[in-house]
Each structure stands twice: as structure tokens, then as C-alpha cells.
Amino acid sequence: MDFAGYQYVATLIVLAEIAIISLTYRRNPKLAIYAALLSLMLKGQYLWVGRPIYAWQIAALFGLIYLARGQARSVVLPAGRGLSAFHVSMLLYFIYTFSISVPMWLLFSLEELGNSGTQVSISRIVTQTFYFLFLVGLYGFGVRAGRYLDTFVLLRAIIMIATVVAYGAIIQTLIVRYAGINIFPIIGSDGTLRSAFILDTTFRATSFAGEPKHLGLAMAIGLIAIFLTRLFRIPIGGFLAIHKPMSMLVALLLSLSSTGYFIAMGGIGLAAALFFRRLRRTDLVVISLLATVLLTQVIGSGGNFGTTLERQLDRTEFEVQDQSVRDGLLANPAFLFTGTGLGNIHLIAVEFLPSNFPLFRTYGYKANSGLFFVLGDSGLIGLLLLILGPLFAARSYFRMRKFLTPWQRKEALSTLALIVVAVFSFAMRFDVIFFMFSGFVFTRLALLRAQVVAVRQPMVFPQADWPKSEPSSLAVPT
């Protein structure tokens, strides 16, 4: 049995987030940033009005205005060549992706590919354009957010949100098991409610995140944030804070999201390999012990959950949508290089769906992974532009690191680690939070570099201020 009132609760949450972002974007930007971050991590919390409306889209509109007014230039100017190139590469990705879409819309329209639900139409072009503009605006919102939050505060905010969501998943699972009521059902596009079960037998937790895969992604982001704070010695509450990663780990397991598992393991592994700093021995001992006990109990418990968990961990292939997009692009090498434009990849990928797979044949779809999502829209050119940004950020950091104080170096390195793991997470699962992180990282590194330039800038006196007198008679003769 599903809790019917949850639909109204979700609506109130979204309305509250929208109100906070709208009212505080200028007067108290920190609150607006927190509300937008909450909306980004809880992707299932939306209002259905024909199309999903998220609170973060309101933040993206403000960010779009911020970019359109050119207010980001004050950050770009002191950023130096490396970080300016970061900013330019992101903007070029947006410009190229939209530019290639216009001729592609015309091409596919003339060829009349697809059916009545997937053909290129004015309504489809408008919806795809608006969604893409939200991504541009989210980058601009991140640029502005970097002025009011440092990386340490952002990581703590992520951890706080993820911890609350994790406890929501644990409570939800307990109530389902002992009372048979799902307090956080999935809200469908038609307003219907349903519980998350695999083959109608194994329950998957969703918490406030809306769907099990969204919960898994939120927990992966939270666990990576926890790891970065421990890696760079950022205080989050002392030893008692161990409940935070453990609750996230439990919620991640309860979500049965294979993507969440791989993003958490891969993101933490990548950060450890590239930014290795010795963790506290107590952390390693406690986490290893509790994780071992937890995994042993869950996997060894038998029953549907243990079997399903093993099956989910054994999944290494991309999802069907991703495979069809990949095969469609490989069969059309020109599109692999240029992309098919916004919303057009379905027109060539649908032919490569398995014959026994009925979904996605009558309406448009894109890949779930950010890698194939970007390749489908803007090809290898767009993917290169998107990847160049973090590379320029890394180059800029290595150029300025010797001039940074230890505290500044810690923030710069943790900021760089954030964008690296964000790229990895984005490649595994298309997530709009990547664009906000990109803008945020750009601003934080630019401001740190501006501080370095201000300290190293030599004092220059105007020529008119120097005394116009003969050399002193006390000068030593040569």
C-alpha cells in the first residue's frame, strides 16, 4: 500500500524550494544555493504540468540571466589563460551543441524519420531547446554560487542532504517491511503512485529521491563528498560523524542501484588514485569493519534481497538505451563525429533496440549515461569541448599551487578533485548537477588565483609622484 498523501508532500516541497530560490537569489544567495542543491540531489521531487518542473530549473533561469548580462566577466578577467580557457570551452560546448542542432532538425525533418510521436516538430524543438538552456543556466548559477560558498561548505551541504535522504530510505524500508506501507512511492507522469519492486518481489528504497536509481546516485555523491572531506582533512563533526557514511552505505545497498554502486566505487577509487592523502587509521579500521559486517549480513542473509543484490553487482553492461545509441552512432560515423543535435538521436538509435524490447519505440529517448548522451547530441566535438574544461582547470592549478597558502592549496586541490569525480559520475549517469559543479569549480579556482595575483602584484608608483631632484650627495661614489 502506498501513502497517497506523498504526492501533496512532494508538491509542497517543490513549491517551497521554488519560493526560497526566487526570494533569496539576490538578497541571501546562500539559501538559494542550498535549495537548488537540494532539488538537484532529489531529482524525483517535481511537479508534473505536462512536463516535469524541478526547482533547480528556477535557479537555472537566474543563472541564465546572470550569464546573459555578462556579470561572469568579473570572474573571467582575473582568471588567467587556463581558467579563462575552462570558461570558454564550456561556453563553446553550449554554442556548438545548439548550432549543430539547427541543421540537424532541418535534415531529419526533410527525411521524415520516426513516427508521429518522435518526428521533428515545433513542440519538440521548443522543449529540447528550453531543457538545454536550463543546463546553460545551471552552469551560470554555479558560477555565481562560487562567490558565496567555498568548496568546504559545499561538500558539507552535500553530506547533510545525503544523510537526511539516507535515513529516509532506512525508515522507509523498515515501515514497508513491518507495516506494509510505502511512505515514499514513485510518482508517475500521470500522477499515479507505485512502489519500487524488482519482479514484484524485492523492494527497492527510494526515500525522497523519487526513484531507486536517483537514490543510488544521491548516495554515491554523498559518499564521494564524505571521502573528499576525509581526504583533505575537512572537519564534518568528529568521530561521531561516522553515522553519516554508514547510513549512506546502507541506503545505497537498499536502493539496489548498480549505477550508484559503480559511481560510488569508481569515484572514490579515482579520487584516491589521483589525490592520495593518508586517511586517518581510525577511519579505515571502523569503515572497513562495519562495511564488512554489513555486506556479510546482507549477502549472506539469503532470500530475494541477497540474490538481487548479487545480480545487480554483477551487471557491467550499459543499459539498453545506451547500447542502442552507441550502435546507432557506430553505424553512422559522421554523426559520431558531429552529433545528431538536440533530441534527434532516437531517430537513428531506435533501429538498434532489441526486438523483444517494446519500450522507447513510440517516443523519443536519449542515453542514460552522460558519455553517450553527449555523443548523441554533439558528438566527439562536443565531448572534447566538455572534457577540456576540467583539463584546463588542472593546468591552472598546477601553475599557481606554489604561490598558494596551505589552506588555499587544500581548497584548490579539493575543488579540483570535485570536478574530476563529477566528470566520472557524469560519464556513468547523465546528471545535471555536473553543470552546476563546473561553474562552481571555475569560480572558486578563479577567485583563489585572483588572491594570488593580488598578493604578488608589485606596488607601482606613478611617475609624477617621484621627487624631481638631483641625486643625493651622500651617494657612494663609484
Image (tube, grey):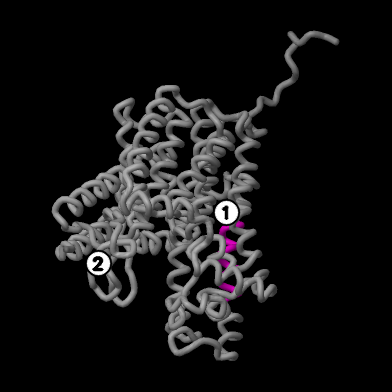
Q: Nearer the viewer, residue 33 or 191?
A: 191
Image-based side of 84 in relation to 25, left or right? right
Q: Nearer the viewer, residue 27 or 129?
A: 129
The residue tagged 2 is 194
The residue tagged 1 is 87
- Residue type at mark 1? His
SS type, badge 1: helix
- Residue type at mark 2? Arg
User: Which callout, 2 or 1, points at the residue further toward the start of the chain?
Assistant: 1
In x, y percent, where is residue 181? 16, 58
**Magenta highlight: main SS:** helix
Which quadrant holds residue 104? Answer: bottom right
Residue name at image x 75 percent, y 17 percent: 471
Picture layout, residue 381 above or below residue 400? below
Image-based side of 47 in relation to 365, left or right? left
In which quadrant will I find the N terminus? Answer: bottom left
SS type, badge 2: strand
- Mark 2 touching mark 1, by CB under 8 A? no
In x, y percent, where is residue 182? 20, 58
Which quadrant holds residue 281? Answer: top left
Picture layout, residue 179 above or below residue 137? above
Q: Which residues are magenta?
A: 88-101
In x, y percent, where is residue 90? 57, 58
